[in-house]
Image (tube, grey):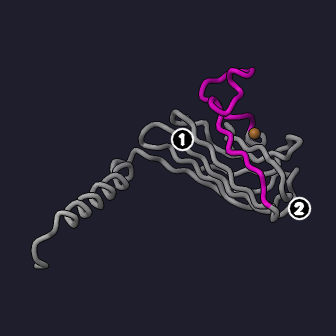
Amino acid sequence: MGGPLTRRQVLAGTGVLVLAAALAGPAAGGSAEVTRGDFHAFAAGAGMGISGHAQMVRTADGRTFVSVHVTGLAPNTTYGAHVHKAACGAGDADGHYQYATGAGPDYVNAVNEIWPGFTTNADGIGNGKAWNEGTAGAAAVAVVVHAPGGAKIACADLE
Ligand SMILES: [Cu+2]
């Protein structure tokens, strides 16, 4: 058709195919799982106009990536955010999801829990992310944003 390929063209074409295969791999295998949801204010955050979304990806290679995007917050402010172990409507999402359940610093940390906290920009917009080793369990069902003082102000159910 278009004449003989040069070595460079052959190599470039092979690279594209390998990349495409790598990108298609997890989806084609069905082993990556994505859950997501929109943020809604809890009573403590009502009236601020909070919105946004959260997403959790349980990757094919056994890790968990959570990202959050939240708007309507105070400018230049650091907020805590965690994956919680109950739905937003069940006891304000209860406590933190943990890989290994327990109390104290050996359990309450960003390795055993999932903490996609963030600092907002001048417009009150925050983007946070967390990478954790290990596939989050079935109880990892919501993401809660906390005010600097700790109050639960917004929640997203991951579905
Ligand atoms: Cu929390």
For the point 38% across and 49% down, the residue is 26
Query: Which residue is nearer to you in this view: 157 or 6?
Result: 6
Among the 4 quarters of the image, the one containing residue 121: bottom right
For the point 24% across and 63% down, the residue is 13
For the point 65% across and 38% down, the residue is 114
| Residue extending farthest bottom | 1
Which element is circle 2 on?
Answer: loop
Identify whether 50 is placed above or below 43: below
- Of the four image quadrants, the one with ligand 1 is top right
- Position in image of residue 46 (x %, y %): 87, 57
Closer to the observer: label 1 or label 2? Answer: 1
Residue 74 falls inside the magenta stretch = no
Left or right of residue 85: residue 5 = left
Residue labelled with disc 2: 47
Residue labelled with disc 1: 64
Left or right of residue 96: residue 55 = left
Q: Can you see residue 86?
A: no
For the point 60% across and 36% down, the residue is 139
Among the 4 quarters of the image, the one containing residue 131: top right
Residue 107 falls inside the magenta stretch = yes
Identify whether 47 is placed above or below 36: below
Q: Can you see residue 109?
A: yes
Among the 4 quarters of the image, the one containing residue 20: bottom left
Upstream in sequence: badge 1 or badge 2:
2
- Position in image of residue 85 (x %, y %): 67, 36
- Position in image of residue 75 (x %, y %): 85, 59
Looking at the figure, which quarter contains the N terminus?
Answer: bottom left
Instruction: State how far apart marks 1 and 2 are (Cα).
Output: 32 Å
Which element is circle 1 on?
Answer: strand
The stretch in magenta equals 94-121
